[in-house]
Image (cartoon, grey):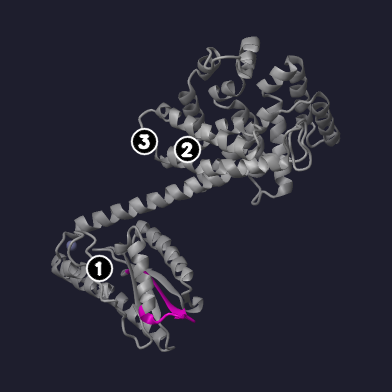
Amino acid sequence: MLIRYCCESIQTHVMTTGMDKSIEELLLAKDRRRDLRMQRLERGCVTLSFNLNIPGLPKSNDSFHAFFKTCLVELKNYLLAHRIVTNKETIHCETDVAGDFFLAEIVDSDYTAIQIKQVCESFETNHPVGRLLDVDVVDEKGEPVSSGKAKTCFFCNNAPAIYCMRKQAHDYAAMRMKVELEISKYQEQRKRERICKQLVILATQSLLHEVALTPKPGLVDRFDEGSHTDMDFSTFLNSTAALSVSFQKIANFGYTFSGDDLKEALPKLRLIGLEMEADMFAETNGVNTHKGAIFLLGFSIFVSAHLLSEDSFTNEKFVSVIQNMNGDLVARELGKKLYLGKETHGEVCYRRFGKKGQGIRGEIQAGMPCVFQKALPVLHERFDSEEVLNDKILNKGLTHALLAIISENDDSNILYRKGEEVLEELKARAGVCMQKDEGENSDSEYEALIDFCNDKRISPGGSADLLAVSYFMYGVNRNLVKRK
Ligand SMILES: [Zn+2]
């Protein structure tokens, strides 16, 4: 219905601006749409059409077309959720001078034409920019179905839309500007949802793939608890499930953060981190499975979301933001006592070993060199050419990346518990395994490393956390940056 009035008002508009040819094409396109509908009516079906209410010309461009496609998917899902099915064989979808257009027959519906119209109207009403959407239903006899409710004008939000169109109550340029603004706001919101969802999926996957990597030296894997006695595979699965809930919160916070200085986000980030620790301990009966991962992944999700919101994500930018946010973290948190009472392991390590004992804080202050300089190049080399990262490919690539991290990482937990000599031997052994990764003795060298960790009761948990972050950063590059 609205198309007709829309054409009438445009006709007047273009006649005064000397665009006779355009209006002729527009009317022809409209006639063709009517013919298409008539062809479908011959089979005695209810038909449904969908188009956008775009004031003025052109009726479609890249932005309108992308918006139309988004809304069409939403409409189809909405109909399907109400068990209203369109006949795939008879679908007609095209873009011409009259804009983007979808036409289909409804099949096997328990609904009458008026009920289908009501469902379509509820779709429009519930949609954030529903007044730009026009879903028309024509019954079996070819009569347009109307619920009798008049749509309010999109522009003035006051008079009925048809009234404003007929009266040409508003300036076309101003109306188009408002339409374009509303569409871009809606698409931006969709983009935020898509990116945040993807970041949450990646973060959760990174923890799952890290723990599932088997075998691992001294760490919990699918079949072995490594050097641990208080946790196993299921403890990590439970912990991951608990943390995944908060990943969404961090992603949204990073995406929407609008302060001048990202450091202003730190108190809230720490607060979410503390909540996550409590959730983790509740699900693991008090065992620390992911404290380091919460810290590293929390930062990584926040900064990635923020840079992706600005379309400015690069690894270099990520590193510089992480460094700016944390500043002199080591001196601030390890150089002076933050907590009353006994020194923490981190404080003891820093006092005894200096730079080498900076642990996870040193790694993040330096912009995560183990991730960006050691593990990521390995993952790019192993995974970039693979379309699907199956279990076998993941296991090989992640094992190699883990070895690259262990060979470089001054893990403060190992330093604190086992001393410098054991840490250096572990690093050297991991380095040897890496060199022989594809060679003849690679398996036996790796087994020897696992035995070494088991014998000495070493758990390179800090390296496992960095592996999870490396997988996450790889995923951001692979899924959200390259395929933008
Ligand atoms: Zn109006």
Q: Which mark is residue 313?
A: 2
Q: Which of 311 and 385 is in front in this view?
A: 311
Question: Toward which corner of the image does residue 363 lie, by quadrant?
Answer: top right
- Comparing labels 2 and 3, the label whose residue is closer to the camera: 3
Few, some or many C-alpha atoms within 10 Å of disc 1 (few <14, some 14-19, many ≥20)?
some
Amino acid carrying label 1: it is: Lys
User: Is 118 on the left or on the right of 160, as rendered?
Assistant: right
Q: Which element carries disc 2, helix, strand or loop?
A: loop
Q: In this view, does 22 lie above or below 281?
A: below
Ligand 1 closer than 8 Å to label 1 CB: no
Q: Which mark is residue 185?
A: none
Residue on which the image places disc 3: 258
Amino acid carrying label 3: it is: Ser
In percent of width and height, residue 310 lies at 41, 39
Residue range of the region highlighted in magenta in the rendering: 99-114
Amino acid carrying label 2: it is: Phe
| Residue plotted at (70% across, 18% down) | 415
Q: Which mark is residue 151?
A: 1
Q: Is residue 201 above or below residue 26?
A: above
User: Is 356 on the left or on the right of 314, as rendered?
Assistant: right
State which image quarter holds ligand 1. Answer: bottom left
| Residue plotted at (35% across, 77% down) | 137
